[in-house]
Amino acid sequence: MTGHTLIVSTCGTSLLTNGRSDQDRQLINRYSNERKPEALPADVRTRLDTIFESQQALLRIPRLPVRLVATETVREHLHTIRRLSLGLPVAETELGKLPETLLMRVNGDVALSPWGEVIWGQERKTVYGEKLRPSPDERLVFGPQFERSVRDLPPDRLALVNERIDDLARYLVAGHNRKALDVKPLQGNPRPPSTHECNAWSDRDARRIFVHYEGAKLVLDALDRGLH
């Protein structure tokens, strides 16, 4: 039942209730999102198992991508998925390359579907921990020393750097300065050409990302210790 509840919560119960008796529809709607199926009455568990087993074609769709296909799909379409997750525009030609199950279209707008959000949330840390990923937006630029400054990071720290780059893209496009990011100007001129700094991570050996503006673009200069 655990696998069943994930599918129902992300895809909706309508795919399972179509053509069912009133009694079966009531069972599905009432119990399909139960997180502790072992607590259900035995007769309810038996009937729900029968219903779900009859939907084997449906159940097989999400299970394979969870680990075997999802990571490769995210790697292959990372730029597109990343921009969708950030609310940035994506060309229709690029959207057409994504599996439709990852997309949701409403009144001409396109976003990650609930299933797409699940896949992205599940695979992001893995993909982000592999290497420094290219900037998600042309207005966010890596300076000549930035890649060198993150070259030897372990996967968990590299994942944080890629996440902060996402935060910087949101900040640059929408002015959203999250607490975890904390963009602020440098006092004086302690580290030219950098004019601003932001958090990379604040635990352990805390690090900052130093940046500066070049017109409408934000240039990432280096990852380093804070100046305080």
Image (cartoon, rainbow, N blue to C red):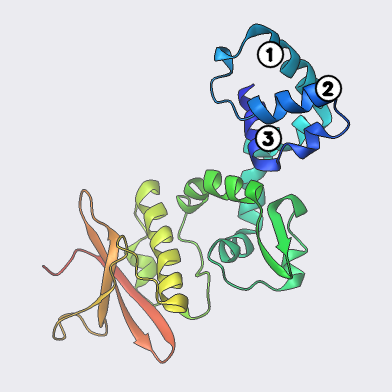
Q: CA distance from mark 1 to mark 2?
A: 16 Å
Classify residue 83 by image quadrant: bottom right
Q: Point out the residue furthest to the right here.
A: 19
Q: Which comes sooner in the sequence, label 1 or label 2?
A: 1
Badge number at residue 54 = 2
**With respect to residue 228, does 201 lie above or below?**
above
Q: Which comes sooner in the sequence, label 2 or label 3?
A: 3
Q: Point out the residue furthest to the front here.
A: 22
Q: Point out the residue furthest to the top here.
A: 42
Q: Which comes sooner in the sequence, label 3 or label 1?
A: 3
Badge number at residue 44 = 1
Q: Residue at x 59, y 18 (%)?
A: 37
As rendered, which of 99 and 72 lies closer to the eye? 99
Give the x, y percent position of residue 147: 39, 67
Q: Residue at x 59, y 50 (%)?
A: 117
Q: CA distance from mark 3 to mark 1?
A: 17 Å
**What is the three-letter code of the residue carrying label 1?**
Val
**What is the three-letter code of the residue carrying label 2?**
Ser
Label 2 crowd (10 A; few <14 / some 14-19 / many >=20): few
Answer yes or no: is residue 154 visible.
no
As rendered, which of 214 and 86 lies closer to the eye? 86
As rendered, which of 196 and 87 lies closer to the eye? 87
Label 3's element?
Answer: helix
Label 3 crowd (10 A; few <14 / some 14-19 / many >=20): some
Answer with left or right where residue 116 lies relative to residue 154.
Answer: right
Quadrant (top left/top right/bottom left/bottom right) for the C terminus: bottom left
Q: Residue at x 39, y 71 (%)?
A: 176
| In front: label 3 or label 1 | 1
Answer with left or right where residue 166 lies relative to residue 109.
Answer: left
Q: Point out the residue furthest to the left here.
A: 228
